[in-house]
Amino acid sequence: MKLRKFLLTLAAASMALLLAGCASTPERVLSQKAPAYAMLPNGHDPLNPDRLSPLYASATAGGGNFIRQMEGKRGHALNILSLSGGGQNGAFGAGLLAGWRESGQRPEFDMVGGVSTGALLATHALLGTPADDTQLEEMYTQISKKDIHNERGIFSLAFGADSLSDTTPLRALIAKFITAETLKRVAAAYSDNRFLFVGTTNIDYGQTWVWNMSLIAKDGNLELYRQVLLASASFPIVFPPVEIDGHLFVDGAARSNVVIAGMGGSERPTPPPYGPGNIYQSTTAGCIARPRPCAGPSVTWQPRPSA
């Protein structure tokens, strides 16, 4: 009975995808709109990858490396936090941040980068107060599936839907936790030379675009700030892509789970003036069951003992 149900479901899915492939969709034109707030991970221009992005060039005005300039302005070696994707496992990231702060050992981050669920954590991780940790706890423990998406069903693809689910609830959830007051606080951190970056995947160009969320906050563009967060958390096919300036974006983790590694640009930097800094990587994508031996009729696998 279970096998029959599985085969029927598989057949239905195949038929829906076949019909979706035959359905006519509106033809899109590749957007040539240059991003005002985004660049490639190495600081280059998304539409002219061989050139530095005006955004990066402006940040490093006067020459030098972006990280080195940040160190000079902050007056110490940097503490950088990178938050990866992982869906609902972002709850572990929220718990990590809260416990880290309660231990008294969590630093004030000079730079935070996030993708996917990490992008949803990133704003409050940068701001870093107990109230911010409480908001993250609420965001990840006081919601259910209906607060994230509405399922359309697989057959919706046959009738022109761009995804299996509608993310109107997630859009509302982001609006609840990212307010105009939140933006003012991110802008204040920017004035103190602390930065927030979020990664998205541009599916038109096949590139990772890194957004300077601090600059968006400084300019008071609340709608764009929320749009970028939604785009970074939009898992392909399951969630619809997000259109920004004619470009289509999906989950940042579709291409890269780390967006801060290239923030120093593509040139070898000078030695750090204050000694080595710290890069903290929170990876929630691997929060799954522990591995165990897989036994079969012809092969038995055993985990290698640790050294």
Image: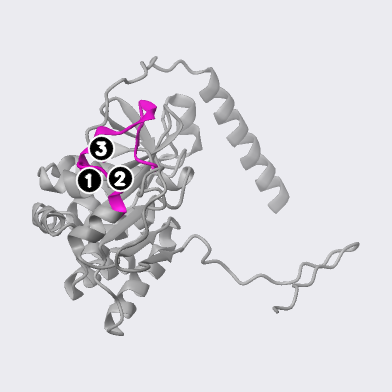
Q: Residue lying at the far right in this picture: please name it.
A: 298
**Closer-to-camera residue (105/164):** 105
**Is residue 189 found left or right of 202 in the rendered image?**
left
- The residue labelled by disc 2 is 230
Q: Are marks 1 and 2 in contact (CB under 8 Å)?
A: yes
Give the image location of residue 233, x and y in percent: 36, 48
Range of residues picked out in magenta: 41-67
| Residue 100 part of the magenta segment | no
Identified by mark 3, the residue type is Ala
Q: Is residue 192 above or below residue 6?
A: below
**Closer-to-camera residue (253/268):** 268
Closer to the N terminus: mark 1 or mark 3?
A: 3
Q: Quadrant of residue 29?
A: top left
Tag count:
3
- The residue labelled by disc 3 is 57
Query: Is residue 168 in view from this perspective?
Result: no
Q: Are marks 1 and 3 in contact (CB under 8 Å)?
A: no
Closer to the N terminus: mark 2 or mark 3?
A: 3
Rendered residue at 70%/78% (across/down): 306
| Residue 65 part of the magenta segment | yes
Which one is in front in this view, the residue at disc 1 or the one at disc 3? 3
**Closer-to-camera residue (251/271):** 271
Question: Marks 1/2: CA distance?
Answer: 6 Å
Identified by mark 1, the residue type is Arg
